[in-house]
Image (spheres, rainbow, N blue to C red):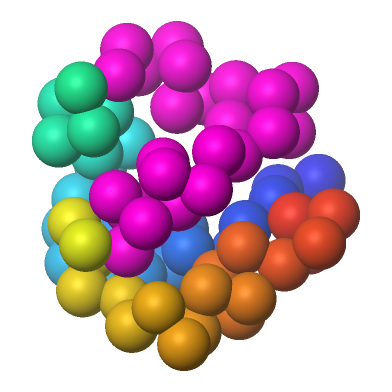
Amino acid sequence: MKYYKKLRAKMHELEIPQWKLAEALYLTPCAVSLYFTRKIEWRISTIYAVCDCLGIPYTEISEYFPKGGV
């Protein structure tokens, strides 16, 4: 099952691959993969950083980072 579908769609729309998002967040690609597969929980500071990188308004955080990732 793929988690965070809307977030992945936004990245696809902006043509930002996962490794590039990792660079922007000063994380390893492996760490970002662990977030996307729900192996580790998103930190609020990381969520805000992702929103800043992708131009997602903070008011839409729950749409891009839903509980359970679905």
Which residue, as the protein is rendered here, is positioned at the far bottom? Answer: 59
Q: Is residue 39 above or below residue 14?
A: above
Left or right: 24, with 21 as reference point: left
In-front residue for pair 49/29: 49
The image quarter containing residue 11 is: bottom left
Q: Is residue 34 above or below residue 41?
A: above
The residue at the point 60 percent across, 22 percent down is: 34
Which residue, as the protein is rendered here, is positioned at the far front? Answer: 45
Q: Main secondary structure of the magenta part?
A: helix
Q: Is residue 63 above or below residue 10?
A: below
The residue at the point 70 percent across, 48 percent down is: 2
The residue at the point 69 percent across, 33 percent down is: 41
The answer to if 38 sits in the magenta stretch is: yes
Q: Is residue 9 above or below residue 33?
A: below
The image quarter containing residue 28 is: top left
In-front residue for pair 14/39: 39
The image quarter containing residue 70 is: bottom right
Please state the horizontal and vertical placement of residue 44, each as a whole percent of the image: 52, 48
Q: Which residues are magenta?
A: 27-51
